[in-house]
Amino acid sequence: MQAAYKGLKEAGIDSKITHYSFCTNGSHYAGEKGIRTIGFGPSQENLAHTIDEYIEIDQLEKGARGYYGILKSVFGK
């Protein structure tokens, strides 16, 4: 988790460690199976898994930078 957090910071994304207010598969993997799980995604949390869900282009680009930052930090590439 710390490596992912570091990767987001290095990608210029000011993230905070918290929890989602909606359900994801992470509930199963982390809660039931005990697998360390992180969640990260573009856009705004209040739009996730709702009717008329959408994403702004700048949020999509920011999400791509975040995913790259996480992978780079976690896998050291």
Image (cartoon, rainbow, N blue to C red):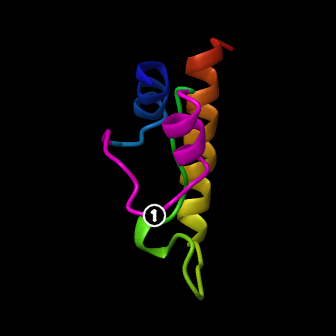
Image quarter where the N terminus lies is top left
* Magenta span: 16-34
Tag 1, which secondary structure? loop
Identity of the residue furthest to the right in this view: 77
At a point 36% along the width and 48% down the height, the residue shown is: 19
Residue 13 percent across, percent down from the top left: 41, 42
Q: Quadrant of residue 10?
A: top left
Q: Crowding near pointer 1: few (<14 within 10 Å), some, many (20+)?
A: few
Name the side, left or right, on which 76 lies relative to 1. right
Q: Main secondary structure of the magenta part?
A: loop
* Marker count (numbered): 1
At a point 52% along the width and 47% down the height, the residue shown is: 27
Q: 29 or 66: nearer the eye? A: 29
Q: Is residue 59 above or below residue 19?
A: below
Name the residue beneath numbered marker 1: 22
Identity of the residue furthest to the top in this view: 76
Give yes or no for residue 28 being in the magenta stretch.
Answer: yes
Residue 30 percent across, percent down from the top left: 52, 35
Residue 6 percent across, percent down from the top left: 42, 24
Q: 68 or 35: nearer the eye? A: 35
Give yes or no for residue 8 being in the magenta stretch.
Answer: no
Q: 12 or 52: nearer the eye? A: 52
| Disc 1 residue type (three-letter) | Phe
Q: Is residue 29 above or below residue 64?
A: above
